[in-house]
Image (cartoon, rainbow, N blue to C red):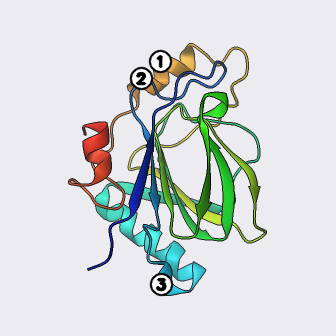
Amino acid sequence: MPTPPEILTFLFKDAGGIPNHPTLPVLVYKRAGPVALNDPSALADWFEAEWPKHGWEAAWRWGGYDFPHYHSTAHEVLGVYRGHATIRLGAEAGVTVVAEAGDVLVLPAGTGHQNLGASGDFHVVGGYPKGQSADLLRGKKGERPAADQRIAQVALPTGDPLHGANGPLVKQWKV
């Protein structure tokens, strides 16, 4: 039986321009994907096949923005399938983590995130709970309070993107 992934949990305060989510923590699943596949494309394919089983849809493959931003209309899941990056979570109120192949990050709506630097081959699969799509906000003057109102209305997902109805996200977010 495989070792369960280490899960890091972070709840951030409001960072001013970037709200962060007031009640839902970020979850970082370390080594959650089957990196033993030894093929980045196969790992990306695995994320894209696994998440829909649990109510999440993969929407894109790419690296990640190097500026702080957040989404007020969707929760987001990121599955690292190649390389590594230093990611700031929670903007000025947050932490910096190293995300590497096999890691999965689940960001509640409103959570600031930024790629501070990455290996040249860094890529993630990004996705959202079924029925949600993300806007792109940068914490600029005038975004709030409308963004806060949208964040409060984002529905909870039906399950954890990796483990479904009994996964860690369900317990942490009280889905």
Residue drawn 55% across the image and 16% down it: 146
Residue drawn 30% across the image and 51% down it: 168
Q: Are marks 3 and 2 in contact (CB under 8 Å)?
A: no
- Marks 3 and 1, how far apart at CA: 42 Å
Q: Quadrant of residue 62?
A: bottom right
Place of residue 110 in the rendered image (x, y in percent of width and height, measured from the top left): 53, 31
Circle 1 Cα neighbour tier, 10 Å, few/some/many (<14 / 14–19 / ≥20): few
Residue on which disc 1 sits = 149
Q: Secondary structure at mark 1?
A: helix
For residue 90, side relative to residue 36 (left or right): right
Residue drawn 69% across the image and 66% down it: 122
Place of residue 41 in the rendered image (x, y in percent of width and height, measured from the top left): 58, 80
Mark 1 or mark 3, which is nearer the start of the sequence?
Answer: 3
Residue on which disc 2 sits = 152
Place of residue 74 in the rendered image (x, y in percent of width and height, measured from the top left): 48, 39
Viewer-side residue, 16 vs 140 = 16
Q: Which amino acid is tagged 2?
A: Ala
Q: Which amino acid is tagged 1?
A: Gln
Q: Secondary structure at mark 3?
A: helix
- 64 w.r.t. 137: above or below: below
Q: Which mark is residue 36?
A: 3
Mark 2 or mark 3, which is nearer the start of the sequence?
Answer: 3
Circle 3 Cα neighbour tier, 10 Å, few/some/many (<14 / 14–19 / ≥20): few
Q: Are marks 1 and 2 in contact (CB under 8 Å)?
A: yes
For residue 132, side relative to residue 17 (left or right): left
- Quarter of the N terminus within the rendering: bottom left
- Marks 3 and 2, how far apart at CA: 39 Å
